[in-house]
Amino acid sequence: MAEIKRRFKSNCTEIRVEHKGSSYLIICGKHINGGFCAFPALNIAVELSSYDGDYDYNEKKLRAAFTGHNEVGTNEDLKVLAKVITNTIQELPDVLPF
């Protein structure tokens, strides 16, 4: 049987992003090791940087996660999503260990 060995705090928020006629429900936040986002309707979750302004890294991570999906059109669309998500993560309080 699985046993929980340790619990960690996290901070997250849910946002809806409208872009070029598409709508995305995104859960994003910070955890003890960085940032993350999830697109529940698309079954996509991504580890991200939680550093201020790390748009390029987060864009690359999103691009890899969306490979094979048609939900996001162009590279420009991914840049926009990366910027919105990165900024949202930065607005959250830092996560401190228990």
Image (cartoon, rainbow, N blue to C red):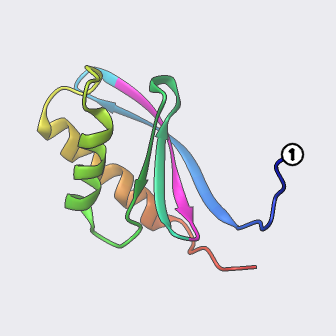
Instruction: Please identify the quadrant where the C terminus is shown.
Output: bottom right
Q: Element at badge 1?
A: loop
**Residue 33 percent across, percent down from the top left:** 52, 70
Residue 30 lies in the magenta stretch: yes
Q: Looking at the picture, tell me which residue is in the foreground, 68 or 18.
A: 68
- Can you say whether 92 is above or below 14 in the image? below
Image coords of residue 5 (percent x, y): 80, 65
Rendered-image quadrant of the N terminus: top right
Q: Can you identify the residue that label 1 sits on? A: 1
Residues in magenta? 23-32
| Residue 80 in the image, given as x and y percentages of width and height | 23, 44
Q: How many dots with numbers?
A: 1
State whether residue 28 is above or below residue 94.
above
Local crowd at mark 1 within 10 Å, few (<14), some, or many (≥20)?
Answer: few
In the figure, residue 48 lies in which quadrant? bottom left
Q: Nearer the viewer, residue 63 or 93?
A: 63
* Residue appearing at x 76%, y 65% in the figure: 7
Please provide percent x and percent y for residue 47: 43, 54
Q: Is residue 47 magenta?
A: no
For badge 1, the amino acid type reads Met
Q: Residue furthest front?
A: 1
- Indicate left or right for 82 with 24 as reference: left
What residue is at 27 percent from the left and 66 percent from the top? Answer: 54
Residue drawn at the location 56% of the way across and 75% of the way down: 94
Quarter of the image for residue 74 reads top left
